[in-house]
Image: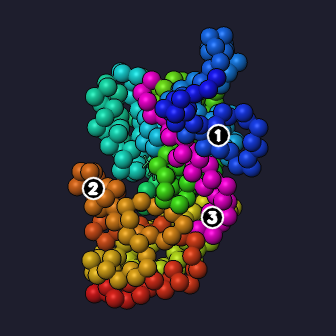
Amino acid sequence: MGQNFDTKSVQLSLNNTNKIDSKVTPIYQTSAFKFKDLEDLESFYTGNKEYLYTRVGNPNSDELGSAVAQLEEAPQGVATSSGLSAILVGILAVVKAGDHILASTDLYGGTYQLLANELSDFGIEVSFVDFEQEIERYIKDNTKLIYSESVTNPLLRVENIKEVVRIANKHGIKSMIDNTFATPYLCQPYTLGVDLVVHSATKYLGGHSDVTAGVLVGNEELITKAKTKVVNIGTNLSPFDAWLACRGIKTLSVRMERHTKNAQILADALRKNDAVAKVYYPKDFSSKGNGAIVSIDITGSCNVEKFFQSLSWVKIVPTLAGVETSVSYPLTTSHRALPKETQQELGITEGLVRISVGIEDADDIVAAFENAIQHAKL
Ligand SMILES: *Cc1c(COP(=O)(O)O)cnc(C)c1O
C-alpha cells in the first residue's frame, strides 16, 4: 500500500527483521514493543513473548541484570535506575511496614538517608549499629533484614560477611550487602550465603563515570519480588544506560587489576609519608588485592584547602570508581547529612580525603599526591 509523505515520514523506521547479526547487543531504545495481533499480544501474558513495555522489561536492562548475577554467582539479577533504587527495591522485597532493619552505622551517605529519612515514613524501623561489636543483641522480634557493605565508605572497614550470614541464618532473617566498593572481582557475598547483593553500577561496573545505574542480585524468589517493585514503583533503568553499564563490565577485570595494583602502591607510599596522619586501606582483603579506594587523614599535618588546590591533574569529584584518579571530601559531600556526632564517631574528620585510584601510571599518581602534600604541609 502506498503511503503519503506525511505518513511515510512518520513511519520511516526500518522494520526490525532481526536479520542483522550485530556483534554487540543493539540498544533497544524503545519505550514499548509491538505486536502483530491480539493473539501475539496475549503471548506476552502467557510467557511466550518476553517484552511488552520498557518499564516492565527491556533486553538491555535484562542483559545487565543477568551479567552481574553471573559475576556474583547468583541465580538472578535486576537492573535499576540507580544504586539507591536497587537498594530500595531489594529492601522492599524483604520488609514492609512494621518490620525492622538492623544496619551498620558506616553506610554510604545516600543509603543512610534512604534508611534513616525515607523508610521511616513508610513505617519501616531501622537501627544503626556499629558492626565491629556483637550485633546479635540488637535483633528484635520484628527484625527482617541485616544490611551492611562488604567494604565501607569512606574508611574502608571490611565487613565480616560470614558472621553477618551466621547471625541472619540463626534468626531466620535475610541479609543484604552492598558490594559496590569491592565488586565481584574481589568479593562475592552471594557465595558466602548473603541473600541479596546490591551494586551502584555507577561505580566500578560502569567504570567510566558516564552512567547512573544499579543492580540487585539474589535467588529467584527475592529477585522476582524485587522486579515487581521495579515495575510498580518505576525504578527501571534506561536502555542506553544499561547498554553503557554492560559495555563497562567487559573491562571490569582489567580495570580492577590495575586500580587495585595502583591503590596498593599509593597506600604504601602514603604510609611512609610523615605528613599523612592516617592511611585507610584494607589488608589481606582478597587474593586479588585490597581494592581501589585509599582514604587518608591529613588533619593537623596539612592545610586541607591547600591540598585540594595542589592536586594538578587529579580531579575533585563527589564520586568514585572511574578510570581517572579522583578525590572527594566526605565531610561536605557524601557524609554531609550525618549528624555531627555520628561524623565524629565514624572518623569523618576535617582532614579526611577519599582517593579513588585510577588506572594511570602508578608513579604519576604517587607523585601527584606527594606533591600536593608537600605544598600543603603545615
Ligand atoms: C554510589 C553508591 C551508592 C548509590 O549509588 P547511586 O548509583 O549513586 O544511586 C550506594 N552504595 C555505595 C557504596 C556507593 O558508592
Q: Nearer the viewer, residue 165 or 211?
A: 211
* On screen, residue 299 above or below 174: below
Q: Which residues are magenta?
A: 232-259
Q: Earlier in the sequence, mark 1 or mark 3?
A: 1
In reply to whether residue 233 is colored magenta, the answer given is yes
Q: Name the residue at 41% across, 72% down.
A: 315
Give the quarter of the image for residue 309: bottom left
Q: Name the residue at 67% across, 21% down.
A: 49
Q: Earlier in the sequence, mark 2 or mark 3?
A: 3
User: Which mark is in front, 2 or 3?
Assistant: 3
Q: CA separation, marks 2 and 1?
A: 35 Å
- Residue behind mark 1: 63
Crowding near pointer 2: few (<14 within 10 Å), some, many (20+)?
Answer: some
- Residue behind mark 2: 336
Q: In the visual, does 205 lie left or right of 81?
A: right
Q: Earlier in the sequence, mark 2 or mark 1?
A: 1
Q: Amino acid at mark 1?
A: Glu
Q: In what element is the residue under mark 1?
A: helix
